[in-house]
Amino acid sequence: MDTIIKKIDKLQPNSEENKRIYEKAGAILKKGGLVAFPTETVYGLGADALNREASEKIYAAKGRPSDNPLIVHITNMEDLEKIVETIPKEAYIVAEKYWPGPLTMIFEKREIVPYETTGGLDTVAVRMPSDETAREVIRAGGGYIAAPSANTSGRPSPTMAGHVEEDLGGRIDMIVDGGAVEIGVESTILDMTVTPPMILRPGKITKEMLAGVIGEVSEDRAIIRPDSGVAPKAPGMKYRHYAPKAELSIVEGPAELVVGAINQMAVGYISKGYKVGIIGTEETVEKYRAGVVKNIGTRSDEATIARHLYAILREFDAENMDYIFSESFSTGGIGNAIMNRLLKAAGHHVINV
Ligand code: TXA
Ligand code: MG
């Protein structure tokens, strides 16, 4: 299959060419095809969420296990009411504050949503993205677009169109290129079917931000203590996602000691003939003495770190590293989401210095 790739002109949002691209994407989606598109978090691989065959195609293209449910993307609250049974009042409060945005909520599904979309569950995950390109594609495709991250299962989520092409080129109908995404890690997932609502995946919208509007919010134990042996409640969180080809270790401790330890390990492995990658920050990159050093962002603004995380993991894959050492980034805010993804990529391998 030839994959059509079209670039959106963000400087002229209402241009005729952009309109033609959205019309094309909409026509493909309505016929049951697959279209990848940017959202503010990561690129999604879209299909008509109410069409069972279309949803099945997503699993095939990604090589995704069929028990791993998809998120349904919408653009307005009226559309939410058509696909879910009951909307608790807390959900309206959260939606009022954080939708459209990087947040997914889980509800009891209505019959109209096929089990192919929900991985066999009676609940459905719904998100209303803020990215304008995403919203145009969703509207053009009929208003209900199932979209997991547009990567091959087990690879880092795509944060630019080139990543999608790398993984899914030739396997999907179209890629809408809207440039690099803004946030870089997937949405927060909040389960509204339990009391109090429970966070199943950390993201930019933090527990504190949610508690600030609805009071008590709990967190899936599997994301707080991933080594506890408890199965995560979001089926997708049990897989070793985001796994780079290299062995990734996170080095934790006082900044000076971390840099010293990484330098020492890098020199040791390089002398044995291995290729070593280092994930440093604006504040430290100058201090590394060996290996391929990448600047992931600045500690003074962790959003920059979230934005570059997946692209750097992909670059190291392309460069065939044997070992990667990363600094640790655990200071609340989006740092929780960054560490959740990084720890998974590292198979929870942490070196304390
Ligand atoms: O930011 C995002 O959420 C991106 C963009 C494209 O919107 N999408 C995304 O989808 O990250 P995906 O499929 O890569 O991750 C969805 C996660 C999986 O871990 C899945 O198991 C969980 O959401 N999930 C979906 N429906 C669920 C449900 N009904 N109950 C529990 N977990 C659910
Ligand atoms: Mg994913």
Image (cartoon, helix red, strand yellow):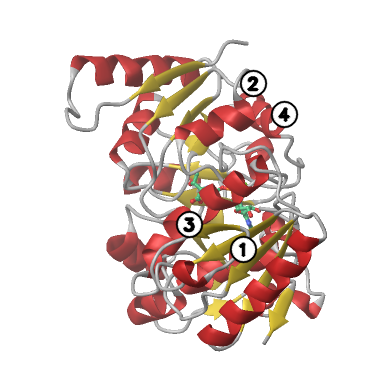
Is residue 179 at all visible to an observer of this figure? yes
Of the residues under marks 2 and 1, which one precedes in the sequence?
Answer: 2
The circle on residue 290 is: 1
Q: Is residue 112 placed above or below 2 in the rendered structure? A: below
Query: Residue at the top extreme?
Result: 2
Q: Residues within 10 Å of mark 4 (few under 14, many from 20)?
A: few
The circle on residue 60 is: 4
Answer yes or no: disc 3 within 8 Å of ligand 1: yes
Find residue 312 and report its horizontal and vertical position in percent: 54, 51
Q: Give the CA separation, mark 2 to mark 4.
A: 9 Å
Identity, as a three-letter code, of the amino acid under mark 3? Ser
Q: Nearer the viewer, mark 4 or mark 1?
A: 1
Of the residues under marks 4 and 3, which one precedes in the sequence?
Answer: 4
Q: Residues within 10 Å of mark 3 (few under 14, many from 20)?
A: many
Of the residues under marks 2 and 4, which one precedes in the sequence?
Answer: 4
The circle on residue 187 is: 3
